[in-house]
């Protein structure tokens, strides 16, 4: 009976994992439910499973555990501990979710392919619905555009369709490399080429400029570090750029949003809505509204540079007179530039500096630099030594982490549940590979990894 019940629980966890790409579309409630259930199950497994213990002892897991403990301590010493703990107390659940995912990937050999099909189906459905909404003004459920210029599909008033597609795109490439049947691989590969083009164009049509920036970074990263997809990505993205150029000429609204408005907000060109005199001709990061958030966050940081003010505290403190940029510089009008106060500063490192101080922000920046260094070494090996520094699948996951921690772009709430679920999803696959060496290819033993990947029925893939 116990064995039967245990099997039932495991199958239930696997179903939740397969439903996760859908949950990210449905909403934060379902995302939180799945991450919490898998996190609790992982904790229950910890005393009994050697595999789970092994993943826990991974240096990445240890770092995130220490970081999570620091966040809790930081909240406890903040000016509003109960409010701040809302973001920090259960932050570790995202790591537990990633560990649980890694555990089940190792336990169920077909799960990684099943998850790939689940994610690809979600992409296909979103692409179909996104283009439907772009053409007709409403999606297949009759939901009209929340913004007349932008496309949101099933996300409705949450304008994150582009974010979903761009942030999970490296994972789509990653999962292709686990197909080990030539007939299936060829069919999916051909379809994947077409899907890539329509995804690129749709990300542009969503009007999400950060998502399109991520798409550019992903494309450059793949071309430079993953030879297996290099020619494919050059051709598909070249076709996409040509189509985007044509769309920009024929659709002035999307051009104004993605190109003209970006140049205006950044102060590159003048406009009647954003005069440089409002900021005393100083540099404006991304937009005047973003700059105001950063100014307030900077003032908050200065009051406690080492420890910060506590997770989630920016939204409280930015309302205080000493941190409100409007009291400091009344010439900055909210109706022109956007309010300085928000739920978060819209930048990962600015938020970490204000809320967790240098102790919280510097380690995250160091992680980003390490990832950048690893990808740079892969670039050197691939392009000059004609062999791989790492398994190309690991490189794809590192590209995913790279855009997550990319510092030169606005970002969502660092402690937000939806965003962290997207952040930690690739980590589950990374922990799975890094703790199960039989799935990895070793560049010191194999000079041509591309040929090794393409071998039929290869036990490594």
Image (cartoon, rainbow, N blue to C red):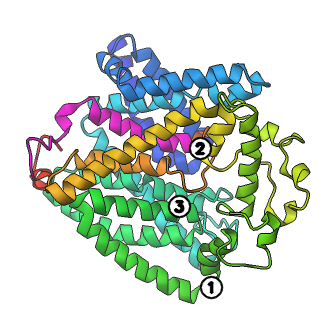
Q: Is residue 364 above or below residue 132?
A: above
Residue 329 horizontal/vertical position (percent): 88, 55
In the image, which disc is placed on residue 349? 2
In the image, residue 62 above or below residue 231: above
Q: Along the polypeptide, which appears first: circle 1 or circle 2?
A: 1
Circle 1 is placed at which residue position? Answer: 252
Task: Determine whether 32 is above or below 398 in the image.
Answer: above
Which quarter of the figure has residue 252?
bottom right
Residue at far front of view? 281
Local packing at callout 3 (Cα closer than 10 Å; few below 14, some 14-19, many 20+) is many
Which image quadrant: the N terminus? top left
Report whether residue 99 is seen. yes
The residue carrying mark 3 is 211
How packed mark 2 is, by other alpha carbons closer than 10 Å (few <14, some 14-19, many 20 or more), is many
Q: What stretch is highlighted in magenta?
A: 419-447
Looking at the picture, does residue 324 appear above or below residue 313? below
Q: Is mark 1 on a helix, strand or loop?
A: helix
Q: Which of marks 1 and 3 is nearer the N terminus?
A: 3
Mark 1–mark 3 Cα distance, whole angstroms, equals 20 Å
């Amino acid at each position: 009976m116990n064995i039967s019940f245990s099997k039932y629980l495991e199958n239930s966890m696997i179903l939740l994992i397969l439903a996760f790409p859908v949950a990210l579309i449905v909403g934060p409630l379902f995302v939180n439910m799945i991450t919490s259930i898998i996190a609790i199950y992982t904790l229950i497994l910890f005393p009994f499973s050697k595999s789970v213990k092994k993943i826990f002892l991974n240096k990445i897991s240890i770092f995130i555990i220490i970081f999570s403990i620091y966040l809790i301590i930081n909240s406890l010493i903040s000016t509003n501990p109960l409010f701040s703990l809302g973001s920090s107390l259960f932050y570790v659940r995202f790591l537990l979710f990633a560990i649980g995912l890694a555990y089940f990937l190792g336990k169920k050999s077909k799960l990684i392919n099943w998850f790939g099909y689940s994610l690809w189906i979600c992409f296909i459905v979103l692409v179909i619905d996104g283009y439907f909404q772009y053409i007709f003004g409403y999606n297949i459920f009759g939901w009209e555009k929340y913004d007349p210029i932008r496309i949101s599909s099933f996300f409705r008033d949450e304008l994150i369709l582009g974010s979903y597609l761009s942030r999970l795109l490296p994972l789509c490439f990653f999962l292709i490399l686990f197909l080990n049947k030539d007939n299936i691989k060829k069919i999916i590969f051909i379809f994947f080429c077409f899907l890539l083009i329509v995804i690129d164009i749709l990300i542009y049509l969503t009007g999400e400029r950060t998502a399109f920036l991520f798409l550019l970074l992903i494309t450059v990263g793949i071309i430079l570090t993953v030879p297996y997809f290099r020619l494919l990505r050059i051709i598909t993205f070249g076709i996409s750029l040509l189509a985007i150029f044509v769309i920009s000429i024929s659709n002035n609204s999307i051009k104004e949003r993605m190109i003209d408005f970006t140049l205006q907000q950044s102060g590159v060109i003048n406009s009647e809505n954003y005069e440089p005199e409002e900021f005393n001709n100083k540099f404006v990061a991304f937009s005047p509204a973003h700059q105001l958030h950063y100014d307030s966050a900077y003032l908050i940081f200065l009051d406690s540079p080492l420890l910060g003010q506590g997770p989630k505290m920016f939204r409280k403190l930015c309302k205080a007179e000493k941190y409100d940029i409007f009291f400091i510089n009344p010439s900055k009008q909210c109706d022109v530039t956007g309010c300085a106060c928000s739920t978060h500063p819209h930048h990962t490192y600015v938020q970490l500096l204000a809320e967790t101080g240098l102790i919280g922000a510097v380690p995250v920046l160091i992680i980003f630099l390490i990832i950048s260094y690893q990808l740079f070494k892969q670039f050197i090996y691939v392009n000059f030594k004609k062999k791989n520094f790492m398994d190309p699948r690991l490189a794809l996951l590192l590209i995913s982490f790279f855009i997550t921690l990319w510092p030169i772009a606005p970002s969502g709430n660092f402690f937000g549940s939806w965003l962290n679920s997207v952040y930690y999803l690739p980590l589950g696959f990374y922990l799975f590979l890094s703790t199960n060496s039989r799935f990895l290819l070793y560049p010191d033993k194999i000079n041509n990894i591309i040929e090794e990947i393409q071998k039929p029925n290869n036990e490594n893939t």
